[in-house]
Amino acid sequence: MRKITAILFITISTICFGQQTIQFADSIRKVFNIPEISYAVIDRKTIIEIVAIGKHSTELPDIATINDRFHIGSNTKAMTAFIIAKYVEKGNLKWTTKFFDIFPEWKENSKVEYYNISLQDLLSHRARIQAFQGDNDPTIPDLKGTKQEKRKAFGKFVLTLNPVEIDTIHKFTYSNAGYTLATLMLEKVTKKNWEQLVEKVFNKDLKLNVKFSWPENQKIKDTWGHTFENDKLMPVASNTDYHLDYTEPAGDINIELKDYVKFIQLNLQGLNGHNNYLTAKTYRFIHKGIDNYSLGWYNIYENGKELSTHSGTAGSYYTLVHIDRIKGYAYIIFTNSFNQETQQGVRLLMRKLKENYDI
């Protein structure tokens, strides 16, 4: 009887949390001018809350649905690291494999400071590679060929640039281009391009419906990203000409929230000691094998908590993920706009979600 009463209490509490949180999230959405917010609270087995509120675009009547797709920006990094981890487990690479062991022919024209960089250095931002985050980036030559060929040419170019200084406080310097170099190592040893590897691991093996670039909104009803110009929200069509300067493996995936939930649950299970697509040992290394920033995840220890976190944007969507590694909860927020207001609203909603389950 006591067990039934406890279950009932938890269920009622969860429903109350959910109703209050939806109202709170919708007020955040309106106050901070975010067209659509989708969020989820999960543990390793269960979706505790999953909600979609708002509109696909400021210019359309389409209402948000749980099937909407979002561009996840730099949260792609964890997915690229996940793919690489699978092939490390297979023996194609080691975390300590040096870049120039795979590309010895590139060494002559590269800066000497890069000679000893390894796969894990690139994925944890310790390789001193230029950031390529859009602000004051070096001018990239006009590159030709397929996406893979352009990435290779871009990689060669990056290695001719002067290295950046490592942040002595955080012990890393964030670099999108570093993820391109790590991906080139994987492409070389597997003889498959990144797009094929994404298709193999996430779509074929794990049955997640992962796609590239902006969500398609010209042929079907789906989310539009939004930028801000003169303090006004501007919808971005999926056929807008844009590119990520050959750093797609660092930030160019779109996905439905419910499929992203499955990906995060794999990580929660692994962190709880369970083998699934990867081994528990690999998940531990991905999330907390390296201080401050591990492999695709910020590795945070604060106030007695252990967190894996990351945010992502390419300028018109914004996503934020927090994994509480001790309690085994994850909190995911997807939005279809980006500016300081969006970030502030998402931070407030994240705080609310975590307060609800800080028990």
Image (cartoon, rainbow, N blue to C red):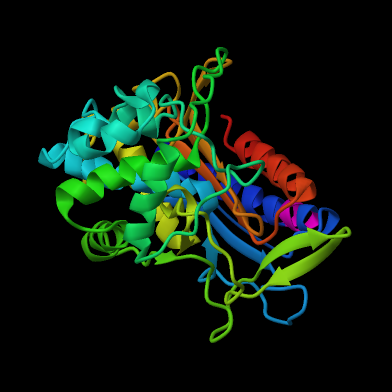
In this rendering, the answer to whether 31 lies above or below 111 is below
Q: Residue furthest left?
A: 91
Q: Main secondary structure of the magenta part?
A: helix
In this rendering, the answer to whether 72 lies above or below 284 is below
Q: Position of residue 39 (x, y in %)?
A: 58, 54
Magenta stretch: includes residue 26 = yes
Question: What residue sits 44% from the left and 50% below the top?
Answer: 76
The range drawn in magenta is 23-27
Of residues 138 and 286, the one drawn nearer to the viewer in this rendering = 138
- Quarter of the image with the N terminus is top left
**Quarter of the image holding residue 192?**
bottom left
For this view, does 183 lie left or right of residue 326?
left
* One can see residue 18 in this view: yes
Question: What residue sits 53% from the left and 39% below the top?
Answer: 310
Magenta stretch: includes residue 176 = no
**Quarter of the image holding residue 60?**
bottom right
Question: What residue sits 79% from the left and 59% below the top?
Answer: 228
Q: Position of residue 75 (x, y in %)?
A: 49, 47
Q: Position of residue 353 (x, y in %)?
A: 63, 42
- Quarter of the image with the C terminus is top right
